[in-house]
Image (cartoon, rainbow, N blue to C red):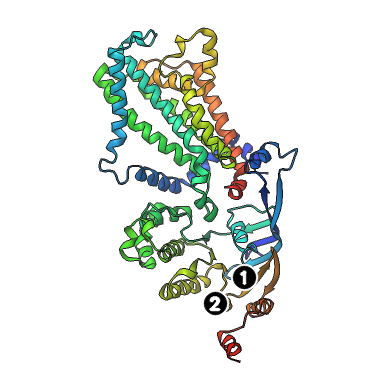
Amino acid sequence: MSSDVVINCQRVGKAFQLYKHRNDQLMQTLFGRWKQYYYPHWVLRDISFEVQRGECWGIIGRNGTGKTTLLQLICGISQPTHGNVEVSGRVAPILALGAGFDQELTGRENAMIGGAVLGLRRKEILARLDSIEAFADIGEFFGQPLKMYSSGMQARLAFAVCAHADADILIVDEALAVGDATFSKKCDDYIRKFAARGTILVVSHDLQTLELLCDHIIWIEDGRVAACGRPAEVTAAYRHAFGIPSTFRAAQARAIG
Amino acid sequence: MQPNADAATGLGLVVPLEKAWHFRELIRAVVRRELAARFRGSVLGWLWAIFGPLLMLSVYTFIFSSAIGIRSAAASRGVANYSLQIFVGLIVFNLFSEVAYRAPALLHENANFIKKSIFPSETLAWTATIRAVVYAGISFGVLLIFEIALLHRLPPTMLLLPLVIGPFFMFLLGASWFLMALGSFTRDVTHLMASIVPVFMFATPIFYSISDAPPKLQILLHCNIVGDYVEMVRDVVLLNVLPNPILYFGSLLASLLIFRSSYRFFMQYKSVFVDVI
């Protein structure tokens, strides 16, 4: 295997254990050796792909097809039921709005903790705090508790912290959709700049952005890889499958015609 | 597999410590958050942390110096000494009870952290224990002031306190890993602890000393490791006595065993927590 493979998923499958009763989880832990108390629900089956250093991969698929679960496996937050996930390098995930943020703490304090979670030293975070504040660009709210923030502001802060984490791999899960036009542009610029040196994995429903940004797209349907390859081909197949018009103009034409 | 690799290096005791060192910045940041959050929004702030123990000790001194005559080996050393002994016992026991009450809910409280960012959940035991130790430290400061004021001396054995608190700290860490893991599977653990900890308090030599009990009962009382630590801390902090070596090394061994096996238990189920909380 080439050493340039930074994310290597081999036949990855993930089953959630569903329980009839809440406390069956405890029974499973104690007596699971002798009796099975759960019903497996397969979210992902047989996913295999390799991401090379410096590539940008997009993940598409309908809601509930396992995209977020796949990202969780890659981040190491949860473990695959079978198969292997190998990741080399520091990962910075933006999985959800304000994930891991404390609503009572100020933006500054949350940035300190967020940076520590991403593996930064205290000195490093302190040195970057001004830069994080400037990137988030939320004015005096940086010193206010997070409960005063709008959801867009929280996304700005989350992205600003991750952007300063010296990550090798950036993982983005639809978190950017809430920012306004200026901030979206800032994020897009950052991602483009990041793409020059690092690896990116992004989940989005915005096919046009993905076509521009990514060099590979993987389409997940019902926990399996439905298609994987060049962006134009995969998105074309995806649009065809769900009857999404390829551009806004085409939609307009259809509506008028 | 992982456990064998753990066992190969330092009896499985080194790995958890190494990991904590690796995440020290994170642990420090979270402890700061916890400490800052506690008295946020109150006018007196940290004075509350001193006021509580101060009031408690004053009341004990008042009650035992006026109303109640206690027939106890401990009481024979004088009223001031007796109320200080109770206070030492309460500090050590409260340290344990805070961890016991809080640990089962820890993973649920931090579910957002654990599910949506790369958060090493085993560090939560460290932050909870350190937080409890900081509050105990404040009470301990109050104790020292009273000890100087009432007895006009500090025993030299006080210098040995770190040697007693060190193993106790390991025990508390182990207890929180174990309770965190259990608590993530069922919420009943939280309620269970709320019911048994107050009962447990009477099995701990806070208001008495183990030597007061009948000999047969003494062996049973020594099985309570928290009680053993209460006695040992009392020995070095107040009584100017070296702890019984058998008791000390027995507790040390038990604590390290609990530390090690609880950590393994926690790490074994770590990947499951994400899916159940």
Image point (32%, 45%), residue name: B40
Label 1 is found on which chain of the structure? Answer: A
x, y percentage for residue A27? Answer: 67, 38
Labels 1 and 2: the sequence-earlier one: 1
x, y percentage for residue A98? Answer: 46, 59
Image point (49%, 68%), residue name: A176
- The tag on residue A121 is none
Decide: marks 1, 2 in contact (CB < 8 A)?
A: no
**Relative to A146, is B232 above or below?**
above
Label 2 is found on which chain of the structure? Answer: A
**Relative to A17, is A252 above or below?**
below
The verdict on a common chain for dots 1 and 2 is yes
> Quick one: A253 or B232, which is closer to the camera?
A253
Please indicate, yes or no, whether residue B93 appears anywhere in the rendered image. Answer: yes
- The tag on residue A60 is 1
Query: Residue type at mark 1?
Result: Ile
x, y percentage for residue A244? Answer: 63, 79
**Secondary structure type for disc 2:** helix
Residue B137, image quadrant: top left
Spot the residue most to the bottom: A257
x, y percentage for residue B36? Answer: 35, 45
**Secondary structure type for disc 1:** strand
- Residue named by callout 2: A209
Crowd around label 1: few <14 · some 14–19 · many ≥20 (10 Å):
many
Position of residue A42 in the picture relative to residue A106 (left or right): right
* Image quarter of the N terminus of chain A: bottom right
Query: Residue type at mark 2?
Result: Thr
Image point (71%, 49%), residue name: A39
Position of residue A88 in the picture relative to residue A226 (left or right): left
Image point (27%, 16%), residue name: B151
